[in-house]
Amino acid sequence: MEADASRLNPALLGAEVDSFVIDSREVKAGDCFFALSQPEYKNNCFNGDFADSTAFAAKALENGAVAAVVRPDRFEEHKSELEKFQDKLIFVDDVIVAFQKLAHGVYLEWNKPVVAVTGSAGKTTAKELTAHVLESSGRKVLRNIKNYNNGLGLPITVLNLAKDSSYDIAVLEMGMSTPNNEIARLCKITPPDVAVELNVLPVHVEHLGSIENVGRAKAELVEGMKPHGTAILNADDFRVFAMRDLHDGQNVTYGIKVESDVMAKDIRFDRFGETHFTLRTPNGEAEVLFPLNGNHNILNALAASAVGHVFGMSVAEIAESLKTVAPPPQRGEIIHFVEGFTVINDTYNSNPDALLSMVETLVDGAGSAKRKLVVAGEMRELGGDSEQIHFETGRKIAQIGIDKLFGVEGFSANLLKGAKESGLSGVEFYEDSNIAAEKFIDEVQAGDLILVKGSRGVKTEKVIEKLLEKFETEK
């Protein structure tokens, strides 16, 4: 959307802006404030009701903002507070679209490679691993902070280039949760040179209807690449592998089970938090000591390795970089306690496949652990079959072979029912995360290996916080 030039103060054209902000609480002198309101959120397919931040525009300007971007109709509604600042207002039809167009313009001026990462699970870990591998080659890498992977978070990330254009490459996580072409929209802001597709899992089916629809939504990343771009595809996921024909560029595949361009061979879990494998790329092989557990993390490492290969890194350079990675907070973070037990903090999010994968990781890497315990929060956005999905997931958890399962909130009770039906007698239900945090600390014993996992809304991180409060960690 173009600004209304007839109402634009010419002095603003030469104004220097330090930063572009959408949260009025973060505004500092020299910033430009974008006042988002419900019409923009609705027009751009954000779910839910949001506060009209036009109400905070006057305060932002009083705090030193150079300008505020607002809709004309919202200005009229808040005219009594904003009229005295009219020379500092930029009027547009859609503030979110204007914000995204600004980010696109900054990206065009920067004009360097973009690696985009998507998938139903593992996006943030794969993004961080990819950035780490590329940084080890001496490149300066821009990446999303936190979970800034949507139509507002990605522009916030890209606009950092307006302040510092010295980045050599951007590694950007792109997410979606609705059938509204979210990834296609993100690709218009920063068209990827390299598209990394991790997996297609039954996540967000409540909004998308089926796993096939999830796959089509994820495929927008490959379709949205620059002409002759490179797609990096997980060959172990047949829905991802099928995306190889959706573009006119090169494909680089990776996998553990299916013969691929980039592979992990001879995988060994010697102790928890220490994985060995042979990395094979088209340029040769190298031994890797990888400080994360689980095949899902190895696949994320292979995706990052494939990116490194595409950007000219040798297999030895990639293997060396993988030795020094660390998991993002709350995503497979390993915490060793002085009292003799170990906790895997994977509380950022959860879905059936991710939960089962982490339970397998727990069991595969248990080594000499005396007990294997799982604290699992209710999984959200699973649609009308949520009760049955939790039940079946509980059955599978029991079959993997743990010693005790703790469910936190809601449908996690069905998780426990399924586990009991498959022969796991050690189950306990907590009504919410506060109760879980208070009671679970009495369960912990020396020699335990514990997985804590849950959807964001359940807040299973409270269990981790209580353990850190009660017990001492190893240095």
Image (tube, rainbow, N blue to C red):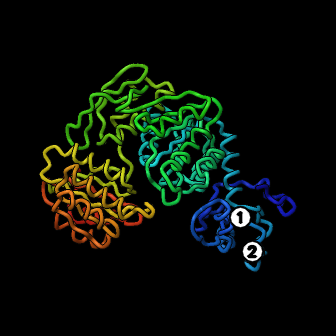
Q: Where does the image place residue 17, in percent across and percent down from the top left?
A: 69, 55
192 sits left or right of 338 in the view? right
Question: Which amino acid, by three-letter code, is at mark 2?
Answer: Leu
Residue at (31, 65) in percent of width and height: 412
Q: Distance between the residues labelled 2 and 1?
A: 10 Å
Image coordinates for residue 53, horizontal then vertical, percent: 64, 70
Q: Tell me whether the residue at label 2 lies in contact with that at label 1, contact meaning CB atoms closer than 8 angstroms.
A: yes
**Front in this rendered view, residue 6 or 454:** 454
**Residue under numbered circle 2:** 82
Residue at left offset 43%, top offset 60%:
382
Determine whether 230 is above or below 107 in the image.
above
Q: Which sits in the foreground, 220 or 108? A: 220
Which residue lies under the disc numbered 1? 68
Horizontal side, residue 405 vs residue 111: left or right? left
Q: In this view, does 215 lie above or below 416?
A: above
Question: Taking 68 as reference, is 130 above or below it?
Answer: above
Dot 1 falls on a residue whose secondary structure is strand
Task: In the displayed orientation, state which residue is furthest to the right.
Answer: 6
Local secondary structure at mark 2: helix
Residue 312 visible (yes or no): yes
Q: Which residue lies furthest to the bottom in this view?
A: 80
Camera-nearest residue between 277 and 219 = 219
Q: Quadrant of the N terminus?
A: bottom right
Which picture quadrant has residue 91?
bottom right
Category of crowding for the residue at label 2, using alpha-carbon neighbours closer than 10 angstroms: few (below 14), some (14–19), many (at least 20): many
Q: What residue type is labelled 1?
A: Ala
